[in-house]
Image: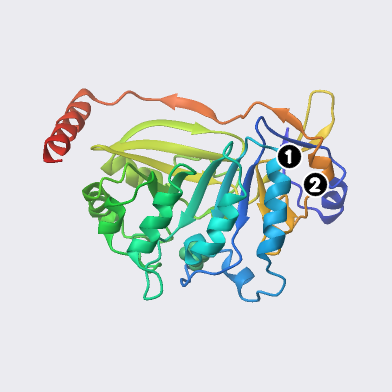
Amino acid sequence: MIERILDKKLAEEARSFPYKTRSGGATVTVFVPYDCRNNCPFCVNKEEYADCTGFSLAAILKSIERMDRLTPYCDFVFTGGEPLANLTSLQTMLDNVSDTHKIFINTTLPVSREQSEEEILSFLNRNKDKITCLNISRHMQHFVQESNDGLLAKLPVRFRINCVLYKNYPKEKLIPFMERFRKVHAPSIQFRFDYTETTPENLYDEAHDKILQDLKEVAEYTGLDGCRMRCGFHFAYKDLELVYHKTLPYSTIFEKDDQGTMYAILYDILIKQTGRIDSDWDGTVMDVDKYAHVTYEPYDLKWLERVPRRAEAAEEEMSFAGEACSAS
Ligand code: SF4
């Protein structure tokens, strides 16, 4: 039985539920203590950067060390704000994450008068063994200040394009958008549903999902993976991997086990700009001592459907790979 506790009294009671999480530990998302220069309409973090009172790099570092000790094999995500807006601070934070973790960075790849392309490239080069993937925001509507696409082609680390398909996005621009990133050899694009609109009812809904239908018109559907919290509809467009990602707007799911014990199952743990450790996006503070005794379960994310690619598409991909090879 899966329940989301909305009632205040029940929410209070939920504090006493023991924690459960996936083997390896919940993902730790670190909010850097400095902002970005954008104002995306779907952003839920912007407000938190309006008042920087209490923001503390030192407190964040302490919390990173604490989570590093508790779950030495969990994933870390740096987000903001803009992690790459202050390379010195980001370096200090990265230096405090042990090499046992995978590290992902959400960024717009900001280039400005104060920070050149060369500085970003040299930072990424220095940390290329540490960074698992850069998730670079680029949207079909012009929400973020973008650096030159040429920079993407020079990145020394793996990257993925993240694109929120927001409200009335221009469907006719899907193919030009994908072609734009093929040119710089982006390996994949993750299209995202506005997660503030995701509910348990529409998470896996296919029939009424306009984005899913639009993608099926322009790309080849190859499968679906998912868990209680999120799912990904996979596609291929020529040599580009696409995922249409949907996730619920919270990070804890309440569920009874077979013995009737209610657990708070954590998917994401947040280190806020003040260093506070939260167990959900709504300001729920985590009981870190309780998390030290968390019960682990196997990660429930799995393939739910796999569809082999059509032969002609695979051939086209191979011939493209050949062209790319001989061109280099
Ligand atoms: S770039 Fe990211 S942090 Fe900045 S406004 Fe957009 S979504 Fe929010």
- Residue 26 figure quarter: top right
Gap in angstroms between the C-alphas marked 1 and 2: 9 Å
Quadrant for the C terminus, please: top left
Q: Residue at x 50, y 55 (%)?
A: 194
Say the numbered circle drawn on residue 18.
none
Position of 86 compared to 12: left or right? left
Instruction: Estimate how packed mark 1 is, as few (under 14), some (14 to 19) or many (20 or more) residues with alpha carbons within 10 Å.
Output: some
Q: Is residue 18 visible?
A: yes
Q: Is residue 79 visible?
A: no
> What secondary structure is found at the residue carrying circle 1?
helix
Dot 2 corresponds to which residue? 288
Q: How is the image coloured?
A: rainbow
Instruction: Estimate how packed mark 2 is, as few (under 14), some (14 to 19) or many (20 or more) residues with alpha carbons within 10 Å.
Output: some
Seen in the picture, residue 68 relative to 257 is either above or below; the reply is below
Quadrant for the N terminus, please: top right
In front: 245, or 208?
245
Dot 1 corresponds to which residue? 70
> What secondary structure is found at the residue carrying circle 2?
helix
In front: 278, or 220?
278
Seen in the picture, residue 168 relative to 65 is either above or below; the reply is below
- What amino acid type should be assigned to the residue bearing mark 1? Leu
Please tell me how many numbered marks the rendered image carries: 2
- Residue 163 figure quarter: bottom left
User: In x, y percent, where is residue 83?
Assistant: 51, 60
Q: Residue at x 40, y 67 (%)?
A: 144
User: In x, y percent, where is residue 21?
Assistant: 70, 35
